[in-house]
Image (cartoon, rainbow, N blue to C red):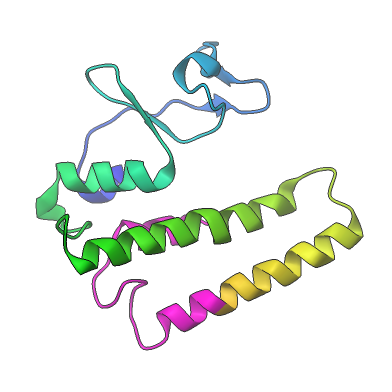
Amino acid sequence: MAREAGHTFDLERVDIPNKKTADGGDYWKINPKGYVPALVLDDGQVLTEVGVICQYLGDQKPQAKLVPQFGTMERYRLMEALNFASSEVHKQIGALFNPNLTAEMKEVQLGVIGRRLDALEKLLDGNQFITGDKYTVADAFLFTV
């Protein structure tokens, strides 16, 4: 999203299982939640959670038109799509990467994922993008998932 919006930034690889940054730093100090993403701002503040980071990046570069104006129904539809992508699609697919997932659990999880993807297909029906005819941060996130 940062690239799409035209931001300049530095990336830092994170070893999630060991909670270490590429330079050996303690990732817990950056994000006490222990997972990615985390966006460290120029003033040292840290933003976490995909939906928040996507909206922040889009809001900082309104000329990119990746985030509808706050207070509009389009913005609420974007927030709805980001929340659905994060909590219902990403989390469900991410569960498949659990090394302790049994064959039975995997079968159940695939059923849940199928239902979420069916819902996503219905949301996209007749639309070029998740919130309609405009590409937004939600589309970029869903592409990643």
Q: Decide: is 18 above or below 128.
A: above
Q: Decide: is 55 above or below 77.
A: above
Q: Residue at x 76, y 45 (%)?
A: 98
Name the one closer to the observer, 143 or 56.
56
Name the one closer to the observer, 32 or 41.
32
Whether 33 is among the magenta residues is no
- Quarter-of-image position of residue 66: bottom left
Q: Residue at x 90, y 61 (%)?
A: 104
- Quarter-of-image position of residue 70: bottom left
Total numbered badges shown on the rendered structure: 0
Q: Position of residue 14 (x, y in %)?
A: 54, 26
What range is drawn magenta here?
A: 119-145
Q: Position of residue 103 (x, y in %)?
A: 90, 59
Q: Position of residue 101 (x, y in %)?
A: 84, 50
Q: Residue at x 26, y 51 (%)?
A: 4
Q: Residue furthest right?
A: 103
Q: Residue furthest left?
A: 63
- Quarter-of-image position of residue 107: bottom right
Q: Decide: is 114 above or below 17.
A: below
Q: Position of residue 81 (x, y in %)?
A: 39, 64
Give the side of residue 48 with respect to residue 20, left or right: left
Give the side of residue 134 with respect to residue 25, left or right: left
Whether 126 is among the magenta residues is yes
